[in-house]
Amino acid sequence: MKEDHALFCNSKHHKMERFLEVCLLLLLHDEAGYGYGLIEQLAYFGFKEDELNVSTLYRTLRKMENDAWVTSYWEEGGPGPKRRVYMITENGKQELAQWVMILKARKARITRLIERYEDLDISKGLEDEHGTI
Amino acid sequence: MKEDHALFCNSKHHKMERFLEVCLLLLLHDEAGYGYGLIEQLAYFGFKEDELNVSTLYRTLRKMENDAWVTSYWEEGGPGPKRRVYMITENGKQELAQWVMILKARKARITRLIERYEDLDISKGLEDEHGTI
DNA sequence: TCATCTATGTTCTTTATGCATATAGTTAAT
DNA sequence: ATTAACTATATGCATAAAGAACATAGATGA
């Protein structure tokens, strides 16, 4: 119980709300890619290897294909096992544009909260460091 | 099915991942408050009345009390039904500080994604509007 | 041939949230 | 004075996103 509470602000407890999907759409907008290979590219968006759940990645890609945001084909002949390569669709590009708008709004909200928090904390900091001033 | 897809980028589908909790902590850091009254104050953080689920609000407050981020007492005597008034605890203040750090990181990620998207879109926009330049 | 690596996929579970509904006291209208 | 509407809090059920663990299978090298 105590340990649970200590972990409460841990990465496992603040999901990225489908942020992964948007990152994947953006990466696939640049160029086609396959599951395992996309993992490295996701580091750019702050997904550490240990943080990223591989099963989530594949499930997400399948779901995106199901929603016709991406299409895929099997790439054989290369080194190692064959890969399922994903490409973004026009549909997917439109979804990406929508998501970017949503993320802008979300960013504005977060900014607003942080600013209001800093207002609290700064005044507290001044009292602590400079007494009554 | 088609309608589902049309709604896919709707507000119902991008949850705020416990953003509500953080907003409540910040509001209660300012001053004690009760469920129904907090709804109005939440508008500051972009929660429209129709967007905010009342049951979620109350459930969240109870959970926060369970985790000892807030405490509550019944306020009687005022106009209307009695209210359960919540106050933030030291524990809650610490959690708030943690969440603000998480939100800063999340904001940085979102910023990064938006910037990369704008890079794509700007070049596309130039082609569309100014031809080959 | 056995282990390891690459690559993809499935099943089960937890968590956050929405929707619907319940409860109950308060105020206003008829 | 009885009914309706409002304020306020709370619970039960359903679903979607995500994690954990496990399953599959070909490729590569010792």
Image (cartoon, coloured by chain):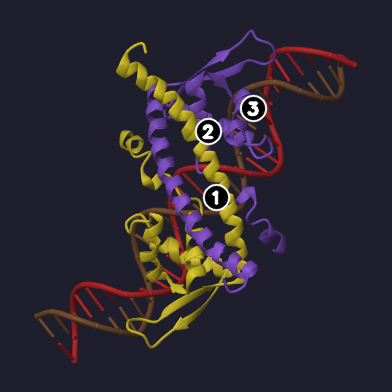
Chain colours: A purple, B yellow, C brown, D red
Query: Which residue is tagged 2?
Result: A60
Residue A55 % position (x, y)? 61, 34
Residues beneath discs 2 and 3 located on the same chain: yes
Which secondary structure lies at badge 1? helix
Say whether marks 1 and 3 touch (CB < 8 Å).
no
Query: Which residue is tagged 3?
Result: A40
Q: Quadrant of residue B95?
A: bottom right
Q: In the rendered image of this protein, does residue B76 appear above or below residue A6? A: below
Q: Residue at x 62, y 63 (%)?
A: B94
Residue situated in front as seen by the camera: B10 or B114: B114
Q: Residue at x 60, y 51 (%)?
A: A13
Give me the chain letter of mark 1: B
Q: In the rendered image of this protein, does residue C30 appear above or below residue A51? A: below
Q: Left or right: D2 with respect to B84? A: left
Q: Quadrant of residue B52?
A: bottom left
Give me the chain letter of mark 3: A
Q: In the rendered image of this protein, does residue B2 appear above or below residue A35? A: below
Q: Quadrant of the N terminus of chain B?
A: top left
- Badge 1 local density, few (<14 within 10 Å), some, or many (20+)? many
